Image: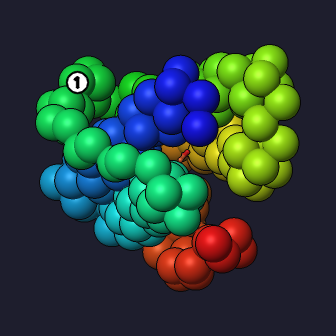
């Protein structure tokens, strides 16, 4: 495998685990303010991010590449309001999209078709992640200021259940 592509794929394990850590912190924020549904939604989001990390880990191992695990950064977003959390989520997903695109661009440059095919799932997934993050902001804008509506929204988010990723390696 090309050295740069290998390095970026390996780094992505860390970025996805950081994402899991960040969403755990979001879940923690919502638990603290009594919005259990939001806390549930982000707890499941954290599980999905851990799955993403494992897919990169598994792909490198399947390709007989060395995996190097690095320290995970402390979640550093300023979580001082419900909306600040949701906006930090969207900002973070846009960043992750840019990372996936950077790896794709490197793989494309050297005709690493297998890595490109592996990343296709993530390109699509990031589109969904950004849509979800955007939807959360829209819903909060619409319903966040009315306690009854916020309660209903919280109930809706409490219904989210975990499902394993559709990509199997
Ligand atoms: Fe692993 Fe939310 O992107």
Q: Kindly identify the residue that appears in the image at 80 percent across and 18 percent down.
A: 109
Image x and y of residue 146, in percent: 52, 46
Image x and y of residue 59, in percent: 55, 58
Q: Kindly identify the residue that appears in the image at 48 percent across and 57 percent down.
A: 64
Q: Relative to residue 82, is residue 162 depicted above or below?
A: below
Q: Residues within 10 Å of mark 1 (few under 14, many from 20)?
A: few
Q: Kindly identify the residue that appears in the image at 70 percent across and 21 percent down.
A: 106
User: Label 1 belongs to which residue?
Assistant: 76
Left or right of 165 on screen, residue 33? left
Q: Evaluate whether residue 153 shows in this view.
A: yes
Image x and y of residue 108, in percent: 82, 26
**Secondary structure category for the residue under label 1:** loop
The one nearer the camera, 108 or 36, is 108
The one nearer the camera, 139 or 110, is 110
Q: For the C terminus, which image quadrant?
A: bottom right
Q: Relative to residue 163, is residue 112 depicted above or below?
A: above
Left or right of 63 on screen, residue 81? left
The one nearer the camera, 56 or 52, is 56
Q: Kindly identify the residue that appears in the image at 73 percent across and 29 percent down.
A: 107
The one nearer the camera, 142 or 95, is 95
Image x and y of residue 46, in percent: 39, 58
């Amino acid at each position: 495998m090309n050295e740069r592509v290998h390095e970026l794929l390996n780094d992505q394990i860390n970025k996805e685990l950081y994402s899991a850590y960040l969403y755990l912190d979001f879940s923690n924020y919502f638990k603290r303010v009594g919005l259990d549904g939001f806390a549930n939604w982000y707890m499941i989001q954290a599980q999905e991010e851990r799955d993403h990390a494992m897919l990169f880990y598994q792909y490198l191992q399947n390709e007989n590449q060395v995996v190097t695990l690095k320290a995970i950064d402390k979640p550093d977003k300023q979580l001082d309001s419900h909306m600040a959390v949701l906006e930090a989520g969207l900002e973070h997903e846009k960043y992750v999209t840019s990372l996936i695109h950077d790896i794709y661009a490197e793989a494309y440059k050297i005709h690493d078709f297998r890595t490109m095919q592996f990343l296709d799932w993530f390109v699509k997934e990031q589109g969904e992640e950004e849509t979800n993050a955007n939807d959360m902001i829209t819903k909060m804008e619409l319903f966040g200021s009315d306690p009854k509506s916020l309660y209903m929204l919280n109930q809706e988010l409490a219904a989210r259940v975990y499902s394993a990723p559709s990509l199997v390696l």
